[in-house]
Image: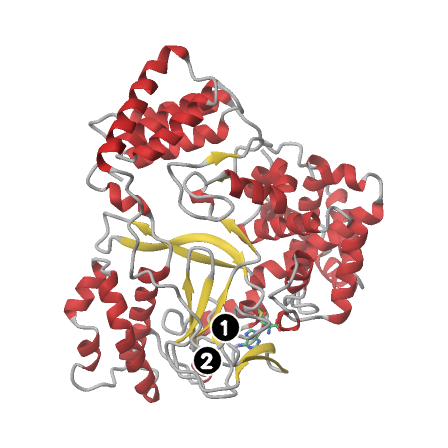
Amino acid sequence: MVQDAYNLYMELWEKIDERGIKKRVARHLKACRSSSEIIAYVRSLLDQFRLLDLTGLPGDGKNDAEAIACRKRGNGLVNPRIARYVSAIRFYNKSIALAEANSAALAEAYGNRSAVCFALKEYQAALDNIRLARENPYPESLMHLVDKREQDCRQLLSEVGEQGELKDELAAKVELSHEPNPKIPQIANCLELKHEDQYGRCIVTNRDLKVGDVVIIEKPHSTLLDEELRYLHCDYCNQEAILSLIPCKQCSIAMFCSNACYQSALDSYHRLECPVLKDVRLLFPNVMVLAFRTLAKTITSFNNNLDELKLFTECVEQTSPSPFDYDWTTIGAKDMYATIHSMSTLQGKHTAIDLLQHAVYAIVMSELLFGKTSLGELCGTNEAHRDFIRVLALHLCHIAPVNFRTQDYMDYTPKRREQFSAKSHFTASYPIMSLMNHSCAPNVDRIDMPSSRAIVVIRPIKKGGQLFDNYGMHYCFAKRDERQTELMDLYYFECKCEACVRNYTIYRLLPTKLRGGSFASVMTPEIDEKLTRHDKRAAAAVLPACYKFLEKLDHLYPCLELSAMQLSVQRCFQMLYSLESGKEKYKDICLI
Ligand SMILES: C[S@@+](CC[C@H](N)C(=O)[O-])C[C@H]1O[C@@H](n2cnc3c(N)ncnc32)[C@H](O)[C@@H]1O
């Protein structure tokens, strides 16, 4: 088993340290005039210490024996005395992912999933799984069980009728609060891009914005599903699909909610990444896996024409376009990539050690692509092409940690007081939103939705003011020194936001500034109790009053009441708009 890419880079750094050549290596890296030189130098160091050995990687592939073992683990959980059906389905899904295409192991895994669907009263899903089982060599000896189940499903469906998903009338669509920009319909027309010496590019408003205004609703360029959800959600659209996931025919990693999603993934990135996805997941943290997927998607969108892609990236680097320069009503995949390629890379600000780390990552990614995917054949012995891929990988490794973000969904957590809680869903790249700079006391918040993200104003912003996002370092939850160190380490800037300049205190120590029960008059104990019970109607009803509170009392900022209200608003957003696990509906049938 080889070590992950982080440990590989650490080992390289230790060897450099042992040899007493740290300073020399750092000087050399900082003096490199191009990414190509950095890559060549780091490669020579890896070779010198004989560290780059990827032969021990497990690789990927179908494995019937493992598939059968997983199915048996699932079977252990469907015993009526245990009745952990949802956990069982996770094992069946893993079994489906691992089983050889067109095998009895695959057929049986579908067959067993159909049994659990039946137990969960999901009769249509049970029939779909029975069809999938029959499309594969399902054992004749067990066929009578499936026949009987099929008959029962049809009978029960004809009795109860097909139960369409209950449409949630409260899950209203989030909409922009102002006219959309005609060329960039995902943003309000009042937003403009500016450049300021202190921040670089930033987004400002040309009109007053009030609390509750939704000003951006953006779809991601690329996403990467959280590892824990691999056997529960679709790898392409990220939706929960526990009863209907189908496997990639080649790898044991990606599962999809439909053939349409499978095909879309293949056409945009999965065909190229498929042979190495398991290794890449093993070797890299999520943001870097998304950098890798972005690389695969980009090569694919240029139809593997590396010369054209090279010319294109050179042109983007010379002209430095911003996402505001494109007409998004007609934008194609290539220009879409330009909006990623021109994201902030912190060019020139990297420390030598970061350059070393990212170069190691880029080299490992490229080696996997050359060694195990069709890109090896495509590049052949063309060293210029290989060099270009390494350089492009390095560029994306610089972009990813600064710009790619994770977003949440609401998982069903029956053991907690609040039955749903936010859990990591996927990592995503958003070209427009990533132009927002950070403040430890942000004036906007994010609404995570199933396949997009919205930006909503949480403090009034005057005409000409900048929209400030929060990069995970909020003054309520971390002290100034801690925030500043973190922001410098990750994003290379010294934060001079109002919370840093005025040294706002953390949440627990914030002063209360309202006399009487003004906060409690909006967020009454009764409403709070309803929110705890996940009452969406209550969340929708209380939001306008929360906005009014934040708008009217902003002059008292910072204080406990305003921060508490911002937290309540975030809680309402999650309840109303985030993807919510459907597992709750099985709570009376089984243990989740
Ligand atoms: C995601 S980008 C934001 C957009 C960026 N300004 C640009 O030009 O593309 C993050 C980078 O913006 C800069 N930045 C963000 N917030 C900042 C702040 N409060 N002060 C100074 N620079 C900031 C830092 O260089 C940071 O690494």
Q: Quadrant of residue 78?
A: top left
Residue 157 image offset from top left, x and y in percent: 27, 33
Query: Is residue 70 something one can see in this rendering?
Result: no
In depth, the one of 230 and 34 nearer the eye is 230
Q: Using the numbered discs, state the Cα–Cα distance from disc 2 to disc 1 in whole angstroms.
A: 8 Å
User: Quarter holding the N terminus?
Assistant: top right
Q: Position of residue 533 (x, y in %)?
A: 20, 58
The mark found on residue 484 in the picture is: 1
Residue at the (24%, 47%) spot, across then down: 414
Residue 207 position, x and y percent, is 48, 86
Amino acid bearing label 2: Cys
Position of residue 502 measured from the top left corner of the image (x, y, whole percent): 42, 85
The residue at label 2 has a CB less than 8 Å from ligand 1 = no
The quarter of the picture where residue 530 lies is bottom left
- Mark 1 is on which residue type? Gln
**SS for callout 2:** helix
Whether label 1 lies within 8 Å of ligand 1 gets the answer no
